[in-house]
Image: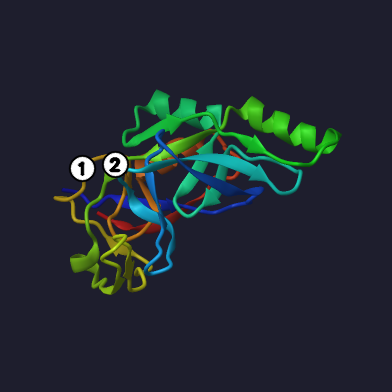
Amino acid sequence: MATIKIYSFGHGRKPGTAWLKTTDTDPGYYIINCPVCRTRGLLPYPCVRSQTVGVLVTKPGTVDDVVFLGPGVWAMSNRAQKAVRDAGLSGIRWVDPVEVVTDERGPTWSGTIRRIQNLELRIAAIGGRGGSIAKANGVKVTRRCEYCGWITWSKRPRSIKIDPEQWDGSDFFCIEEFRERLFTARAAETLASVNLTGFSAEPAGTL
């Protein structure tokens, strides 16, 4: 099998922060708020419990086609969604609606909210599987909570090696140890070809 380059999302501009709320709907990320280890965060893989994600706008301004909301959580515009569908990219689906929350008023704020609505932003729920990178990359567990299941790993190498036998073949995928979402060169080229604002692809390794 030929070597395939993989990428992660560059963060770009962050117009707001992720608003997280436990719910029975997608995208299926597992919220941790542990009374034992005191961890608050998201497990790397979608699990049984889930949450909805909205956009909490903290200041008015430009809203991009690709929006970083928090670790492992991205929203993408209708243009990005169309590019993914047209190319037949796998391992990703779209969850909506994205709720826009702000206490502010005025033409600047209303313009920002209209921009978000016109973009038809949806959360990118990435469900492809890349398996575990621990053995191949020397990553080790540094902390584990038996109560909530949270695992802290040693620092991820700058360039990682994905085991092709554990990868399910998806263009967009997760790995077990870290929350970042990865994608193939094919996916990177597709998204770059339509000149999406807020999108950048950072080399993450190979498989």
- Identify the coloring: rainbow
Q: Residue furthest front?
A: 35
2 and 1 marks in contact (CB < 8 Å)? yes
Residue at position x 24%, y 52% from top?
Answer: 3
Q: Residues within 10 Å of mark 2 (few under 14, many from 20)?
A: many
**Residue type for callout 1:** Asp
Q: Is residue 192 above or below residue 161?
A: above
Query: Which quadrant of the view contains residue 115?
Result: top right
Tell me the tag on residue 168.
1
Task: Give the image location of residue 86, x and y in percent.
Answer: 41, 23
Q: Earlier in the sequence, mark 2 or mark 1?
A: 2
Viewer-proximal residue among 26 and 135? 26
Tell me the tag on residue 128.
2
Numbered disc total: 2
Helix, strand or loop at label 1? It is: loop
Helix, strand or loop at label 2? It is: strand
